[in-house]
Image: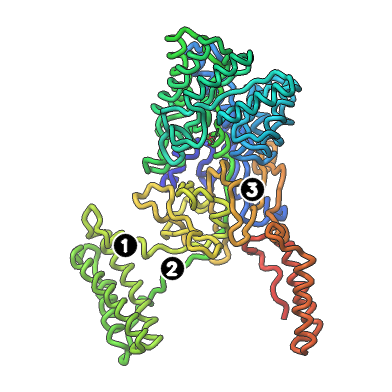
Amino acid sequence: AELYRLESWSDGFFVVDDSGQVAVQPLDDSDLRFMIMDVVDEAIKQGMTLPILLRFQDVLRARVQRINHAFRDAIEENEYQGSYRGVYPIKVNQLQEVVDEVFDAGQPFNLGLECGSKSELIAALPYLKDDNTLLICNGVKDRTMLSLILSAQRLGKNVIPVMEKFAEFEELMELAEAADTATQFGVRIRLRTSGSGKWADSGGYRSKFGISLPELIEIVEQLKKLGRSDAFVLLHFHLGSQITNVQILKQAAKEISQIYAELVNRGLPVRYLDVGGGLGVDYSVDNEEGAIHYSLQEYANAIVTSVAEVCDQRDVPHPILVSESGRAITAHHSVLVVETLGAYTKDRIADNFSPANDADDTVKRLAALHEELRNAKPGEWLASELLEAYHTIDATHRDAATMFRLGFLALEQDALVERLYWSICSLLLQHLRYAAPDPRPPEFIELEEKLVDQYLCDFSVFQSVLDHWAIGQAFPIMPLQRLAEKPTRRALLVDLTCDSDGKVSEYVSSNEDKSFLELHSLKPGEPYYLGFFLMGAYQDIMGDAHNLFGRVGEVHVYADQEEEGNFWIEKTIPGIKIQDMLAQVQYFPNDLQRRMNELIKAKIEAGEIRPKRGMQILEQYLACFQQETYYDTRRTNEVTK
Ligand code: PLP
């Protein structure tokens, strides 16, 4: 567990059980736990195939509660006079079951929703059964969207469109005038404070969004002219996701509080102060861009105390605090379970290899070195000698390639050179572990990188962990079983896509070198499952259909101590079928069948294939339409003799 830094990212939801398996401990008020492997086995029994995304719905609920309790405690502790109301930004994970669960868990805390587009608005509106429930509408809004928002307001719903641009404000006012209706809105301020980390450009003067201070003054003046000052109810900023430094958040909260105080003193009835998203999730990465250096309670305290301080100084009422945390609510609740399909190590030579008399000289020289290194005791060779040997065999390896190209080295001899080279590299690395001084020489790092195994895994980086490919976000990955056993392999995880970027190139681990993951060697006939953790935020919806690998299957799981294994599966959703993936790029079954049929018929007519065999091939082709897009490990559908 320590190797994979489980304790630092799991937030207490995942633990390693005495059985050496990863268990889920999803409830805050109980230590009830169940094994992820048991859930996977049960899902497979119910007909699901891997990869599978497991959703632990209790974890979602626990996160909603923890965030609300942190604000409640900060408010009590600091005698803050206003209240706190979170809104869940559905862009982070729009799946209906996720929104339902978050919304339901949030009801005791008055949790509302946030939408950022027309489609999201349409999904979110029906949740507003209670007129008091907040719906904040961010994003660029066209007339259709603004009109629908006005209509929802006319229904008495607490919908607040947030003006991202001055022109949007003008359009809203024009539509409200034309409909002769009252309205309410908020303004996203382009603060001078900007965030830090990978998403920093969402705030500050370079931000794509927001209203500048001169524009804000213009809005206030226009509202006065129109006699609609009462419409301005909310001020908002968003520093970008994953705020890394709480001091920056404090600065931003103070900056917006000054603006709030100014507006209140000018007679505008601003009630809500919306601090946006950005509450960090600790993925336990060490780099400066990604590390989160504060706790949830520290985050809530920072906002409450900063706003209170400015409001007290300026003698204005404490506003209702709103935050739009998404990642921090959803990240922990889902785990992608992936099966390893094979491990590819560099070719090695047999330990007792001795070259034939007529072997090429290069083979003989390498074999002698191999023998010598194999028999040397740890520490017997000095680091300088080992490095020199490495330089020499590296040159020999290159020379052999040239000789082969020019026809001076036979294929079998070249293959022996290859095996000997990798075996010697491995021995050199073992000896260097004893002999190399700190800091490790570059050759040492090069050897480590060269010698990692490739573990082929049944998933697509582009579909399931897009942020890893796009912005280098590292996600915690670890085996779900055999954790009582020391891992002996260094692995690079590669996916099914035909793309050299289809791999995981940075890992969360306690090793200084994050370019590999320590795993167990695979045992024939025994599946080896890996869990990709903290998958619940953004990854599902941003997934891309590279190579037509599509949405993976899902299993929704709840804890229940009355059930065998302490859990029950509420729902399974199979992964997308090949037929549906193809339809997204305009291939349809009837047309494909007709064209395939023509192609086979031509062969039958030419007498190259028997009609019965031709029809079998057509059936085999058509049966694949109903398959899922990933590697099928079940060994069905094999070619008939
Ligand atoms: N609010 C706005 C306006 C956003 O753009 C985002 C996403 O970046 C969020 C809230 C959610 O942020 P997070 O997932 O970091 O909580």
Q: Quadrant of residue 400?
A: bottom left
Give the percent coordinates (x, y) of residue 192: 42, 28
Q: Nearer the viewer, residue 225 or 356?
A: 225
Quadrant of the image containing the N terminus: top left
Q: CA distance from mark 3 to mark 2?
A: 31 Å
Mark 3 or mark 2, earlier in chain: 3
Q: Rate crowding at label 1 as few (under 14), some (14 to 19) or many (20 or more) other CA atoms within 10 Å.
A: few
The residue sitting at 43% across, 21% down in the picture is 255
Residue at mark 3: C-beta within 8 A of ligand 1: no
Q: Residue 465's spot in the image, x, y percent?
A: 54, 50
Side of 207 where 267 appears, left or right: right
| Nearest-to-viewer mark from 1 and 3 | 1
> Which residue type carries mark 2?
Thr
The residue carrying pointer 3 sits among few (fewer than 14), some (14 to 19) or many (20 or more) residues within 10 Å by Cα, namely: many
For label 2, count other residues whose C-alpha is less than 10 Å away and answer few (under 14), some (14-19) or many (20+). Answer: some
Name the mark on residue 345.
Answer: 2
Quarter of the image where one finds residue 528? bottom right
Identify which residue is drawn at 72% across, 26% down: 128
Q: Amino acid at mark 1?
A: Glu
Q: Looking at the rendered structure, which numbered label has been put on residue 446?
A: 1
Disc 3: which residue = 39
Earlier in the chain: of badge 2 and badge 1, it is 2
Residue 318 seen in render: yes
Residue 563 locus on image (x, y percent): 69, 40
What amino acid is labelled 3 in the image?
Answer: Val
Please tell me whether mark 2 sits on a helix, a strand or a loop. Answer: loop
Numbered label tally: 3
